[in-house]
Image (cartoon, rainbow, N blue to C red):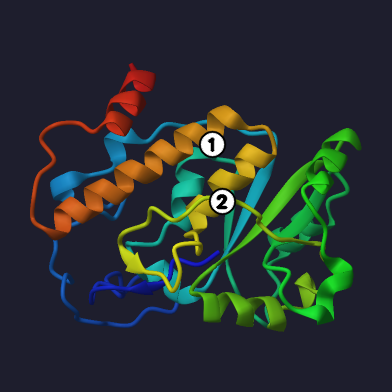
Amino acid sequence: MSDGSPVDGSASLEPDMPGAGVFKARGSFVVRCEGCRLPSLNCLCPFRVLTHSRARFVVLMHRLEHLKPTNTGRLIQDCLPDTQVFTWSRTEHDPDLMALLEDPAMAPMIIFPDDQPDYADRVIDDTAIDAAFDGGKTPLFILLDGTWRQARRMFRRSTYLSGLPVLPLNTARLTRYRLRKAASSAHLCTVEVAIELLKKSGDTVASVRLDDYFDVFNDSYAASRRYELIERPTPAMRRLTALQE
């Protein structure tokens, strides 16, 4: 749902991304891999492993998230190629996104907290996931990728989302994301939300692989901030490398 707030000045590093301008900040001169956007010192690409799930994801990304190499929403698409990422717009409706939401083979549900009474009639629970499978449909999890403030604005101002069921994520998981500060350890970053949803949909293998990939991302980026090369592979690195071999 939210990646929190950046803890350094590396938010805007790629002026060729949508909505970007020229921005110079701490970390803006770091040499980065063009594939994974991580500092080349600890590139993530060797550990990318494709996997599959019965459920599908749509990542509705705030335009500023495109500029942040610490963004985790893109990790979902790295591992689950059926994932589609769209830049959020309040007024412009992407035709491919609209087609997905209207596809009778899909059961779209927006992942959002059930903490406000004005949309209580739209709230569903985890049984809706099994109900979708039982009805021959594919659960389509819609993730709002931005800070909590941005995500709430996206939820409130998107008329094309206003009729969709709302699935709150109920999990005991505490965030392991170390690259941005979160208001609470219960606030998961976007890829952690996807990992927990994969578990709920019975996609255990996909959840484990995506979780390992997230751990490698977390460790690699954190080490690069300290200008340290990871010389000994972590357990998650070894598991992902073994899958490739």
Rendered residue at 81%/79% (across/down): 117
Rendered residue at 59%/73% (across/down): 88
Front residue of 95/29: it is: 29
Q: Which residue is mark 1?
A: 207
Q: Amino acid at mark 1?
A: Ser
Residue 78 placement: quadrant: top left
User: Above or below — where is 111 with respect to 184?
Assistant: above
Residue extending farthest to the top is 245
- Give the percent coordinates (x, y) of residue 228: 8, 50
User: Above or below — where is 32 with respect to 55?
Assistant: below
- Give the percent coordinates (x, y) of residue 143: 61, 60
Q: Amino acid at mark 2?
A: Ala
- Looking at the rendered structure, the secondary structure element under dot 2 is loop
Evaluate if marks 1 and 2 touch, with contact meaning CB atoms under 8 Å apart. no
Residue 48 seen anywhere in this rendered image of the structure: yes
User: What number of labels is visible?
Assistant: 2
Q: Which residue is mark 2?
A: 172
- Looking at the rendered structure, the secondary structure element under dot 1 is helix
- Give the percent coordinates (x, y) of residue 216: 31, 42
User: Above or below — where is 232 with respect to 37?
Assistant: above
Rendered residue at 19%/31% (across/down): 233
- Give the percent coordinates (x, y) of residue 162: 80, 74
Residue 85 placement: quadrant: bottom right
User: Above or below — where is 128 with respect to 11?
Assistant: above
Rendered residue at 62%/79% (across/down): 152
